[in-house]
Image (cartoon, rainbow, N blue to C red):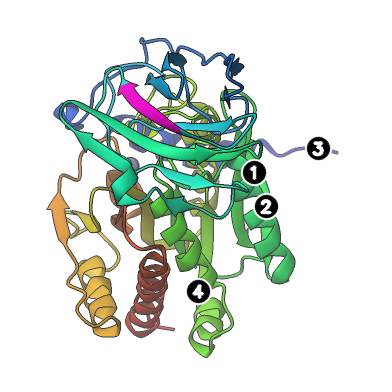
Amino acid sequence: MKFSPVPIFIGFLAWFSFYCHAQFNLPLDSSAFVDTHTKPVVFQKKQTFAFPNGVGFSNDFPSARLNGIAQDNETTFTILIRPENSPINDSPWYAFKVWAGEDIMIRINLIYEHGNHRYWPKVSENGSDWRKIPREDYHSDALGTSFQIEVSADTLWVAAQEILPFQDASDWSDKLAGARNYVTKKIVGQSALGRPIIKLEENAPVNQNKILVISRQHPPEVTGYMAMKSFVETIWGQSDLAKEFRRRFDMIVYPMVNPDGVDMGHWRHNAGGVDLNRDWHFYRQPEVRAIFEDITRIVRKRGTKIYFGGDFHSTWSDLFYLNEQDTLAYIPGLIPEVLEGMALQIPDFEPDDRPGGYLSPTSKSWFYNYLHAAAVTYEVGDSTDREVIRERGKAAAVSLMKILLERVKK
Ligand SMILES: [Zn+2]
């Protein structure tokens, strides 16, 4: 078989022009990030901590974080939580298992290095159904954080938020693809430690019109991940609106961008010690690079337009970060319109939108500058009611579908 050099050369030129554009043309706002790639990650030692009175703790499971523990008296323990490296955003994740030989009430003090307490502790008997520790059993102020829990021979899970490790993203993706013959799960690359970077998309993507969704760049941000699931399930749902939408638009979903960080119980970074949402200019990290290359391949196809890019995160309250400039987007002003559409569906919901810089090395800037997508960082409050999260994720999807069907000509 003979290969003609001409199409290969043209293909190379197309790739190279996109690559140069992506690599060099963005005037980066370097004040927008702290570079930590030279700060090595300290790996957490996985172990069981057993005490003479029969109380035991473990961090030997995915998403665990417990770096050290001391017994202060018969029923009081102080747990040390360290970040993967520093400096780091103040989102100290913790997760461990605890048990005892007999039923006993214990008190736990949480202390942190390089961070302050943030997440209201939650417990679970089975690792999937969670409840907050009652207010009367939990105290946190500037002097410290402590709570009391009843432990028994049955293992109790204690964590900052619901534990949703890489396996959850994998299972959810399999289930979604299994229940819908038009959706397929693919692996587009590997994390630094070899975990798959999952993509979900139509198994026969035919539409040049597309939307893009990513989530879980930051490991503890599980409420954003919950909203992402609701958003995606609505767009790939059975409503007439969704069916009509899918006739004209495809969706690309990378549900867990940072599987290493998630399974290592990191506060924010990947296994390379880097905030992935500050790598969308450099593509130094394998996770961002894999997605960058996959999207590059998709948009290289003539006529492809990605109208919307949504990146799901969590913070202290529900809010939406927008690009303060979006005149180059295929549909300028799309995100505020989507938020208005959400407000129409949900009584008393006033979206808190925050226009911000569009030149930072974040996904939001990248979606706009390189794809010309209207972009949003969809932030969900740490403590937002879990049903409300689902309801709002669904409303966002409904609003986006309606507007895109209306605004994009057939
Ligand atoms: Zn985040």
Name the residue at the bottom extreme.
240
Mark 1 lies on residue: 167
Q: CA distance from mark 1 to mark 3?
A: 45 Å
**Comparing labels 1 and 3, the label whose residue is closer to the camera:** 1
Mark 3 lies on residue: 2
Q: CA distance from mark 4 to mark 3?
A: 47 Å
Q: Quadrant of residue 395?
A: bottom left
User: Dots 2 and 1: beta carbons under 8 Å?
Assistant: yes
Q: Amino acid at mark 4?
A: Thr
Image: magenta residue range? 106-111
- Residue in the foreground of this view, choosing between 56 and 290: 56
Q: Amino acid at mark 3?
A: Lys
Q: Secondary structure at mark 1?
A: helix
Q: CA distance from mark 2 to mark 3?
A: 44 Å
User: Dots 1 and 3: beta carbons under 8 Å?
Assistant: no
Above-or-below relation of 324 to 257? below
Residue 314 percent across, percent down from the top left: 33, 48
Mark 2 lies on residue: 171
Residue 81 percent across, percent down from the top left: 39, 21
Q: Secondary structure at mark 3?
A: loop
Name the mark on residue 234. Answer: 4
Residue 23 percent across, percent down from the top left: 35, 30
394 left or right, relative to 52: left
